[in-house]
Image: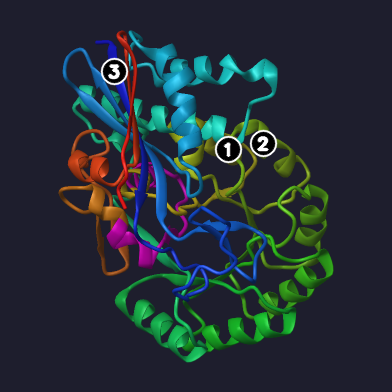
Amino acid sequence: MKIQNIAVFAFKYDHHYRLGGHTDAPNRLPGTDYYFEPQWKHAYSRLTESCLVKITTDTGLTGWGEAQAPLVPEVPATLIAKLFGPAIIGLDPEAPELIYDRLYHLSHVRGHTASYTIDAITGIDIALWDIKAQAAGQPLNQLLGKVSSPRLSLYVSGLRRSSLAERRQLAKEKIAEGFKGVKIFIGDTAEKTIEECAAIRSAIGPDAQLAFDAICRHDYQTAYQIGLGLDDLNAAWFESPIDPEDIAGHAALAKAIKTPLAIGEPLRTVREFEPWIAQKAMQIAQPDIARCGITGGQRIIQLLQENNLQAAPHIGVCTAIGIAATWHVASVLAQPVMQEHQLDMFEVANRVLYKPLQVTSGQAVVPDGTGLGIRVDEEFVTENSPEKWLISLQGIRHEVKNIN
């Protein structure tokens, strides 16, 4: 079996992630769909964007992958179309680890070992694992190892409501439904952050898990004050408290507070995780499978296990393709922790599938079909992708259309 062609989609669906719970897109960048939330430094999109990959073999077997790209999915798509796709035509799709390493080293000497480069490799990698598991007649998780649980405990990530009273009510409802906990985002002062965390804690009770994600907003002293408040609230973890490149600062904070630090969303390879582990700058690691791939994710998890660290895979803005891949990886973790569930995104994420992924009583039901166990609605993907590339031995075909 050989790789015959690769289709790449710059997917853009008209759905606003609404990180802050509002409906507007403030501080819009001219001529784009990108804007700045007032509480955070990072750009967001008023659309749901991602880079989707379909690989077809000479036997007709196909696999789907996703390179999480909530901003500018054209970048990883172009990397795949111009470099990575042509580099894998004719190769054996049942050797994803070898192909991952081949692609990684294409630009390794030039220093392109992170960010969009790994995202692009990830889209290919997930699709190859999908094919490999289908060829073996197994669900992906069974191919990866011993399945710890076919159902995964979930926490609700973000309470996207405009008032604290509404956020408290939503938190109570979701815990009653069976979700294990909630994670909240607050871009405010230490005092107001602790007050809201305490209000959510009182709403969900002492047994449900409460996590807080600062989205890298704070300086060390503010993060330390918040950390002390989270200690009093028995928080599950404090996520991304300060500058995402400040390993030493995170290491100091990890020693200064009791609440575990959860880090990993921006990190994509073993090499990127190594210094964080060496400096004890995290207690819970959050590799994002739609950013590091199945191959990269497995290698990272192995490193975490060797260092007695928990893995709690991150799920950001992505479609059900990335979610399914993450669930398969999480289901073979020896010590699974509660998994991230993007409540307001899940229905939209499922629209790329004929049969949606299922969440029942606060638990993720890992697909049990072969491969990823999903059927992608390619017509829907194409309709919502303003750019598409097809890479084959005959060359590269680029299609552009206006979907507005």
Q: Is residue 261 left or right of residue 251?
A: left
- The answer to whether residue 375 shows anywhere in this view is no
Whole-percent x, y for residue 282 in the image: 68, 52
Residue type at tag 1 = Arg
Comparing 401 with 175, the one in front is: 401
Q: Which residues are magenta?
A: 324-348
Residue picked out by circle 2: 272
Marks 2 and 3, how far apart at CA: 31 Å
In the figure, residue 130 lies in which quadrant?
Answer: top left
Coloring scheme of the render? Answer: rainbow
Q: Which mark is residue 236?
A: none
Residue picked out by circle 1: 268
Circles 1 and 2: CB atoms closer than 8 Å = yes
Circles 2 and 3: CB atoms closer than 8 Å = no
Element carrying mark 2 = helix
Q: Which mark is residue 5?
A: 3
- Closer to us: mark 2 or mark 3? 3
- Depicted 130 relative to depicted 251: above or below: above
Looking at the image, how many numbered discs can be counted on the residues?
3
**Sequence-earlier tag: 2 or 3:** 3
Marks 1 and 3, how far apart at CA: 26 Å
Is the residue marked by circle 2 packed among few (<14), some (14-19), or many (20+) residues within 10 Å?
A: some
